[in-house]
Image: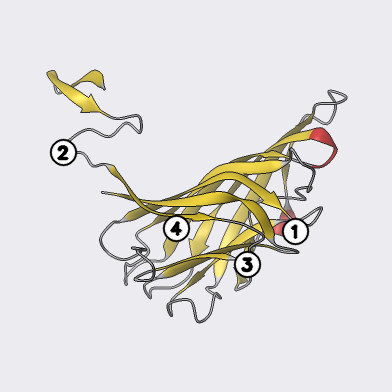
Amino acid sequence: MALVKLNNKAVSNATAFGSITGLGSMVFIKKLTASSSATLSFVDGTDGVVLDDTYKEYYFTFNNIHPETDMADFSFNMSIDSGSNYNVAKTTTYFKAQHQGSTGNYGQIDYITGFDLAQGTGFQRLTEALDNGNSSSMSGHLTIYNPSDTTFVKHFMYVDSEFGNEVFAVNSFVAGYGNTTSAVDAIQFKFDTGNIDAGDICLYGIA
C-alpha cells in the first residue's frame, strides 16, 4: 500500500499498478503458459477468458517468451468471429532501439519499414529475430483499447525488452489500429516460424 493524495484528500489503497479506488483497477483474467505451443489464443467466453465490453482496455503481459526455432519473430492478430479467422486489417508502425552488449556497438534507433502493415490482414510482428539460445527471451506488454466497440477502430500499443541474436539488447515499439468496427473477440499469438517453446502470457482487464 502507498499513501497518496487526490484532490488534497488522503487515499491509502494505491496499488503497484497505480490504481486508486474510484479510478479503476487491474483485474486478472487468464494466464496461458507455452510448452512447445504452436499458438496461444485468448477467445472470449472460452476457458474463462473475458474479452468483451466488460472492460474498455485489455492488457497482455509477456514473461520470458522463448522461441523453439532460431531467428523467429513473435506476432499477433485479431479475430471478429471467435477465432475462426485471425485476419483483421491493420495499419501499424514498428521501430526499435538496440545496443550490442559484447562490443558496445550498434547503439541505434531504427524504423523497420518491412515490419509495418498498410491495411494488411496478416499477423503483426512484435519482435525481430529472437534466437533460441538457452538464455534468450522476450518480455513486454500489449494494450488493446475498447475491442468490443462497434463504432471505432481498435487501437493497440506494444513495447518489450528482448535479449536477441548476437547478444543484443533490443527495445521494440509497435502501435496501430485494427480497421474494423466489429467487436474483436479473440487474440492469437505465435512465432512466424516454429513453436513457442516456453513463457507465459497473462490477460488483464482495466476497470
Q: Is label 3 in a helix, a strand or a loop?
A: loop
Residue at mark 3 to residue at mark 2: CA–CA distance:
37 Å
Q: Which residue is mark 4?
A: 155
Is the C-beta separation of discs 2 and 4 under 8 Å? no
Residue in front for this viewpoint, 29 or 154: 29
Q: Which disc is residue 123 wearing?
A: 3
The residue sitting at the right extreme is 103
Residue at mark 3 to residue at mark 1: CA–CA distance:
13 Å
Q: Tell me the kind of residue under disc 1.
A: Gly
Residue at mark 4 to residue at mark 3: CA–CA distance:
15 Å
Q: Which residue is mark 1?
A: 114
Residue in front for this viewpoint, 112 or 202: 202
Quarter-wise, where is residue 102 in the image? top right
Q: Which disc is residue 140 wearing?
A: none
Q: Earlier in the sequence, mark 3 or mark 2?
A: 2
Residue at mark 2 to residue at mark 4: CA–CA distance:
25 Å
Q: Earlier in the sequence, mark 2 or mark 4?
A: 2
Where does the N terminus fall, quadrant-wise?
A: top left
Residue 41 left/right relative to 43: right
Q: Tell me the kind of residue under disc 3.
A: Phe
- Mark 3 against mark 1, which lies toward the viewer? 3
| Residue for point 38% across, 73% down | 181
| Residue for point 26% across, 41% down | 25
